[in-house]
Amino acid sequence: MRSRVRLLAAALCLAPLLGTAHAADEFPTRPIRLIVGFAPGGATDVVGRLLSASLTQELKQTVYIENIAGASGLIAWKTVANAQPDGYTLMMAENALSMRPALPEAASDPFDPVTQMSGVALAAHSPLALAVAKHVEANSVADLIKLSKANPDKLNYASAGTGSVAQMVWDVVKQGAQIKAVDVPFRGGGPAIAAIIAGQSDIIMASTQVAKPLVEQKIIKAFAVTGKERSPALPDVPTLSEAGIKHADAELEFWYGVFGPKGLPENVRIRLENAIKTVINRPDIKERLLTLDISPQFMAGPQLEAKLKTEIANWKAFTASQPKTSR
């Protein structure tokens, strides 16, 4: 009798665990929320929407985008980090995630993506372009350096906001090229490029997909791109290295990856990882991304987490090397 009671008790204890495992095996059984930490229309949002539409087909369950903008992505990151780690709340992130831990404000409002987020998969990457407004009297990086030194603190840089990828990459480029310019923060990349177009600001780091039509229409001038190779969108524009800009050991391209809350069940993570790998290898998705000068690039979750750790260390080393008055 006692043995039967023990067996019954053991079965009751195991039932919730078996139910959870069974539910995970069937994942997904309901819609998945893919959060983007920026307003609609930006590169991260575009990649997220392309991915969500195709993942809906691949997973046979709706994957929908929710834009939660604010604090250069931090509000969205915290939303995902605090969600149930069941695979139904995910984040389409870019490398601002690796930059924020290096910022001074991170000390007062801590967020640690390494301990709070699970990497699912890297999906793509794309370069930025160092560009200037058409009124700027320079036609190359060398010209811009001379102009900035001849007119110290008269040029300004249209920043997409403290902690944004464009602003952090600019800090690296500015140091490497020894360009003197005052940082003018805007509430995102859209307002920043609008100020350049209007002639209210002088210099910007813009995504190549944003820069391409403006360069072709001679509204802005592009002097260098951050990729290791020239961008197909701007084939006549040299890389930073070709333009003679030495820079710190930090990732200077956008990258786009999917993350979830820490503690995702491994079989759920692998299911999502494999779905993303399948999707970004589809010819139609590759073609649509490449049209935007965004290159598909798969990386499994564990490798994405390792990349995140390395980049956080690199950005912390860079910011620690900067004088406190550099911005």
Image (tube, helix red, strand yellow):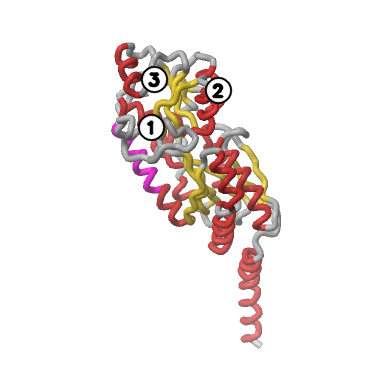
**Which quarter of the rendering shows the C terminus?**
top left
Of 28 and 150, nearer the camera is 150
Kind of residue sitting beneath label 2: Pro
Where is residue 27 drawn, in percent x and y?
Answer: 65, 61
- Which residue reaches farthest front? 236
Where is residue 66 drawn, in percent x and y?
Answer: 65, 41
Q: Who's the residue at 37% across and 18% down the image?
A: 181
Kind of residue sitting beneath label 3: Asn
Q: Please rate how many residues cluster around mark 3, counting C-alpha atoms within 10 Å: few if below 14, some from 14 to 19, many from 20.
A: some
- Picture quadrant of residue 11: bottom right
Please tell me whether residue 90 is drawn above or below residue 219 in the rendered image: below
Q: Who's the residue at 38% across and 32% down the image?
A: 238
Quote the CA–CA distance across marks 3 and 2.
24 Å
Q: Taking the image as drawn, is residue 28 in sight? A: yes
Magenta residues?
309-321
Quote the CA–CA distance across marks 1 and 2.
26 Å
Element on which disc 2 rests? helix
Kind of residue sitting beneath label 1: Pro
User: Is residue 316 in the magenta section?
Assistant: yes
Q: Mark 1 points at which residue?
A: 238
